[in-house]
Image (cartoon, rainbow, N blue to C red):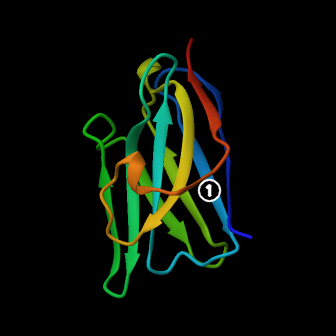
Amino acid sequence: QLQLVESGGGLVQPGGSLRLSCAASGFTLDYTSIGWFRQAPGKEREGVSCISFSWSGGRTNYADSVKGRFTVSRDNAKNTVYLQMNSLKPEDTAVYYCALGPSGTACIPSNFGSWGQGTQVTVSS
């Protein structure tokens, strides 16, 4: 059974760091894309970062708002994708979701069909 499970959210002060995990089961990450998305109260869900796996290797992209602060990576042995978030800001506060899509797809929510349950990230002093 295909499943994505996020973990690692929490409360952190501005400037702090968190690492989110997206554990995949029921499939392998090869030839897929894993996207990280977030949704703040009253706002639409938005793409944060996506990583795409293909025969030529991995490809990543980031929203402008997180470039230089967030890093997406993969652990093959654990079939897990991570989102390392540094220099967190209050505006990063949201529920973060990981989702599965086809390899090479654009990093927009409508292109991803299977979603995790989400993990809350709160950045506040």
Q: Quadrant of the C terminus?
A: top right
Q: Residue sitting at 49 percent across and 23 percent down?
A: 40
Most foreground residue, 40 or 93: 40
Check disc 1 and report its element: helix, strand or loop.
Answer: strand
Residue at position x 59%, y 47% in the image:
20
In the image, residue 112 lies at what x, y percent? 46, 56
- Whether residue 29 is visible here, answered yes or no, is yes
The residue lying at 63 percent from left, 72 percent from top is 79
Farthest bottom residue in view: 55
Q: Residue furthest top?
A: 125
Q: Residue 86: x percent and y percent?
A: 45, 38
Report which quarter residue 80 is drawn in: bottom right
Location of residue 117 (image quadrant):
top right
Task: Judge from the rendering whether residue 109 lies leftward or rightward of residue 118; answer left or right.
Answer: left
Q: Position of residue 19 (x, y in %)?
A: 58, 46
The 10 Å Cα crowd at callout 1, few under 14, some 14 to 19, many 20 or more, is: many
Please determine whether, in this image, residue 61 is positioned above or below residue 1. above
The answer to which of 94 and 72 lies nearer the viewer is 94
Which quadrant of the figure contains the N terminus? bottom right
The answer to whether any part of residue 70 appears in the image is no
Kind of residue sitting beneath label 1: Cys
Task: Check disc 1 and report the residue beneath it.
Answer: 22
Which residue is rendered at x = 49% and y = 80% of the image?
30
Residue 102 falls in image quadrant? bottom left
